[in-house]
Image: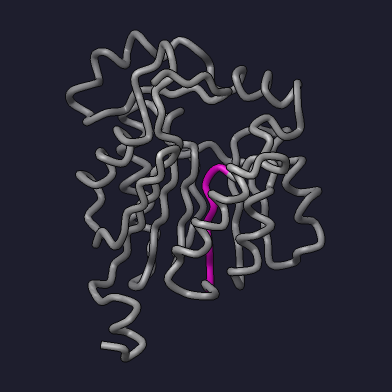
Amino acid sequence: MQVQDKRLFYPSRLFNEFYCLARYIFVLDQTDYFDELYKKSDDPWEYEQRWYEDRKRQICLALLLKPVYSKVLEIGCSNGVFSQHLAQRAKQLICLDANSKAIQLAKTRLENLSHVQVIQQRIPDQFPAGSFDLIIISEIMYYLKPEELSRLIEKVENSLTSQGVVLCCHWRYPIDGFVLTGEKVHHLLKQHFHLQHYLNVNDPDFIIDLWNKETTTLAFKEGLI
């Protein structure tokens, strides 16, 4: 099934297998691509209009293992729609995006939330200092080259607290002209994260995986078993 979508998928399969192919597929400049999207719309993926996006956000939030986290990092915040919901589950939230228009939109949306900081950074070359007990990575890994994805995985692992959690969520369909799918991204993550794989959600449209540093389940921690 081929699905047309506004996303571009940059290939980053298992690093050694796809590196040579990737050299010939990285033809679009990420900065120009996102600049063009945000010129056309303040909400390029219609986060505020689509039930698909709302439902996906609710599922991601429901999968988190704690009601509130101390310090949360959201990588790829876009215009801040998901950030607004995530802020209710965080004592401190840092939102990252590489696009200046997205940052402007997110800052406007979140300006009344004093515990939220919006920063323009392009990962993995830039990455916030400190440790986080929750890192959210959603719909962004398609755009990284293999070596960039490898460095991001390392930085994410090194930035987790002793009870840290990573949640990744990606669209799973192939798109004409591009190699990478969400399934390939998550297969790579499962191979390269040195963390406990806690859960997986295989929705027909997207895939979610959650990793943490602890080996006990939520029911065990709360004395149910």
> In the image as oriented, which residue stretches furthest toward the bottom?
223
Number of disc labels? 0
Q: Going by the image, does 13 lie left or right of 97?
A: left
> In the rendered view, would you say 47 is above or below 115?
above
Quadrant of res 221: bottom left
Q: Going by the image, does 62 lie left or right of 36?
A: left
> Which one is in front, 155 or 168?
168
> Which one is in front, 113 or 183?
183
Residue 26 x/y as whole percent: 41, 14
Q: Is residue 46 magenta?
A: no
Residue shown at 58% from the left, 23% from the top: 6
**In the rendered structure, which segment of residues is drawn in magenta?**
70-76
Q: Image quadrant for the N terminus?
A: top left
Residue shown at 31% from the left, 48% from the top: 154
Q: Main secondary structure of the magenta part?
A: strand
Q: Going by the image, does 127 lie left or right of 16?
A: right
Quadrant of res 90: bottom right
Residue shown at 69% from the left, 67% from the top: 115
Q: Image quadrant for the C terminus?
A: bottom left
> In the rendered view, would you say 141 is above or below 156?
above
Residue 4 x/y as whole percent: 52, 19
Residue 99 x/y as whole percent: 64, 32
> Which one is in front, 192 or 181?
181
Q: Going by the image, does 182 lie left or right of 15?
A: right
